Amino acid sequence: MGARTNSPHRRRIEVPLTAMAIAHPPILSRCREVLAGGPTEAARRWKGPAIGCFPVYSPVEIFHAAGALPIGIFGAGGSVELTHADARFQSFVCSIAKSTLELAFQKRLEGIGGMVFHSICDVARNLASVYRRNFPDLFIDYIHFPQNPTSSGSLDYTSAELERVRRNISVWLERKITDDALRESIRAYNRSRALMRRLYQMREESPERVNSVEAYQLVRAGTLLPPQEHVELLEAALADLERRAVKRMDRIRVIVEGAFCEQPPMGLIEVIERAGCYVIDDDFVAGWRWFANDVAETGDPIRALAGAYCRQSRPSSVRHDMTRPRHEDLAKRVREKNAQAVIFAPAKFCEPALFDYVLFRRVCEREKIPHLLLEFEEKMWTFERARNEIETFAESLLFE
Amino acid sequence: MADYKGTVHEHSKRIMGAWYDTLAQAAKTGAPSAYIMITGNCVEILRAFDIAPIFPEVNALQLAIRKQSLPLILKSEEMGYSSDNCAYVKADVGYTMEGGIGKDAKIPTPNLIVCNFVGCNVYIKWFEHSAEFLKAPLFMIDVPFLREKEPSKEDITYVVAQLKELIATCEKITGKKFDIDRLREVCALSRRAEEGWARAKDLCKNRPAPFDAYFDSINMMGPINVLRGSTDAADFFDAAVQEFEADVAAKRGPLPEEKFRLVIEGPPPYPYYRSFRDLFAAWGAVAVQSTYSTVGGIWEWGYRHDPERPLESIAEHMIVHNLCNRSLLERYSQIRRYVEEWKADALVIHSIKSCRLFSAGQGDMRDYFVGERHVPTLLVESDLEDPRYYAHAQMKNRIDAFFESLEHRRIVSMSV
Ligand code: SF4
Ligand code: SF4
């Protein structure tokens, strides 16, 4: 792991995670239970077919409308020893690609009959091929999402691509996917996405109400639950959090950017807050919170999903959109959300994130936005160094 | 070591030099120019408008060959690029920042940046950055990856729609009206060059192969990918084929003796191009086919630009007929055909740190060829641009050990 900051001094301040201490146990412990069970337990509980969705965005509605449970597969988070994947992917490839492959080699995707990958980067694309060769019994698809959303042909193309996926899933599961079922699934995921937007709104307005680990877990649980259950979980949690008695701490407001695919270890998310930051926005699990507003619930559902992808997607390092340069968008978010700094958290070897960092950094320097770079990888067990870096960084801003 | 030069090399150097002169000229006069990438490119369209094409990948590899890449890479790393980012981009950005592009330089500031996103996702980042640094407009051509056996009707329609939008943009930039007949002429010239390139590759099925289809192919990749659609390129391939046919008739190869026939996968280590080649030459090993030579286009299986259907055939080239827009498994089949039809003894995989498009998963490729196809396979690692990743002694040991074992195998099988 690497961290860079300009500030030379080091001083330890212990900031307690107050919100964690007063967490409402039943809802959050249910959430943690879901996460601990992981993908295989999620598939077992569902009792029907399940499909693994590699990050970032996946058209989950199509799978759900076919009666399959879409499950987010984000690698193994450091929980497996690489015994096969290391021989297939070189040392300079990100951890999520390798550990996602290892899960299948170690038969730890039980109950998951297929995997879908998307046009996010060169590694994910090749990973789809390696999966296909090594696990011929799995259903594998690779989806090419448009990188030119402003062409006159984009919407038709995206619709055709989603129709292709619908056809493939239909053949695989031997099930018809009706427009009605699709609209139903769009409604269900719209609700869970809307509640996640509310959760993020809460973090922006009163970050002391929900700490970043809780928020992360609430969102991440949605990658393992049917949307209806995720909605129930979020509704109950939001009601609890709104009632929570809290006190605002002396912390800086930061945006965390760069962990849209491989997910940082929970320990790192926790350390960012403990070391003196309120995370008021981030791009963790970005694919499952992909749309800025609801997907249309009436009319042709495939066209609605395609239109949403072209016009309602959040800016992301894996999606080109020349009408909204991502670095300018970051500066705008910093202003609008009243953030004091940005923490860049790319996964080690993640090219989309590492490339974007260059333009992000330039815009931060132009706008005088303080920033810190923290690279992470799955197998990261101690966070002392990260904590020191963040503390120094936060203090330098607090005592400015 | 051996002198690998020949008339084909000289010819290539001459016409590529003339292209560089055009760029230097455009920098001075402000004649229209555009950035474009090598892979599955649509240079035909730029040519139809007389827009000078600039290929930053070619500039980057030239910097590496001339051993000028490292300081530029370091310059980029100071700007925040990671040691793990593709070094082609870093060398190019470093070069741009050092004033390599512009009115007083040899390469003009482009009027347009055409990002033909054909497979490599890094292309998008690279040209987003170039557009930002050079303040030039970016035109994205999103080419759907070949994810089924054939492209769909909608894939083709989408690319054609974008090509038409590109044409409208070129009209604006040049003030010229689009002339479809001019595009047809360009496509016919492309076709002639492609015929020659395919024929040249086919000649490597002979023993000995008339040229090294990895190391010598580099000299033909400029003409086919950069100059395609020009008379220069078409004439070049006519002449090259003639020369190779004469070599075949005379049983002349690039080395005094062809002892081993290889298929090589992956880009070469440009900073150590010559010494890398020597390591194979020392064993009498010649590449009879290579995947790198097909990044721009796969012509050996019959695809040609079609003057009758210029836009559709350009779209088909971009989607289907180049290595980068096809899956890793398609690459396995391509290599398998090469090994079988070109009668290769072994596969060498040169794994490149910079280029995950090529390298991510090459361990699986080795597993497939060794385990399922029983093809002797060597996997070595370095980089195509960053000299820090080339360990000469280690490379030599690995290559020598591999050929020793191949030689041993041969003796054993002969004695059986
Ligand atoms: S972490 Fe980055 S490089 Fe790795 S698969 Fe995800 S987007 Fe690709
Ligand atoms: S990643 Fe590979 S194909 Fe892409 S720009 Fe770099 S070297 Fe070229």
Image (cartoon, rainbow, N blue to C red):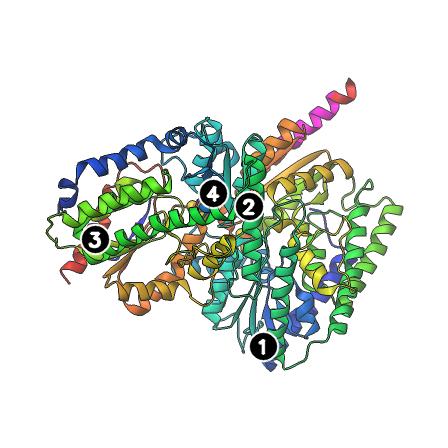
Task: Give the CA separation, mark 2 to mark 4.
Answer: 12 Å
- Please state, as top left, top right, bottom left or bottom right, where the C terminus of chain A lies in the image: bottom left
Residue A145 in percent (x, y) is at: 52, 53
Circle 4 SS class:
helix
Please indicate whether residue A41 sits to the left or right of residue B186 in the image: left
Q: Residue at x 18, y 58 (%)?
A: A396
Whether residue B414 is in magenta: the answer is no
Residue on which disc 2 sits:
A165
Q: Which residues are magenta?
A: B400-412
Circle 1 SS class:
helix
* Mark closer to the chain start, 2 or 3: 2
Q: Amino acid at mark 4?
A: Ala
Q: Amino acid at mark 1?
A: Ala
Say which of B235 and A89 sits in front. Answer: A89
Residue B219 in percent (x, y) is at: 70, 56
Residue on which disc 3 sits:
A278
Q: Residue at x 69, y 56 (%)?
A: B316
Residue on which disc 4 sits:
A65
Q: Amino acid at mark 3?
A: Tyr
Task: Give the CA separation, mark 1 to mark 4.
Answer: 57 Å
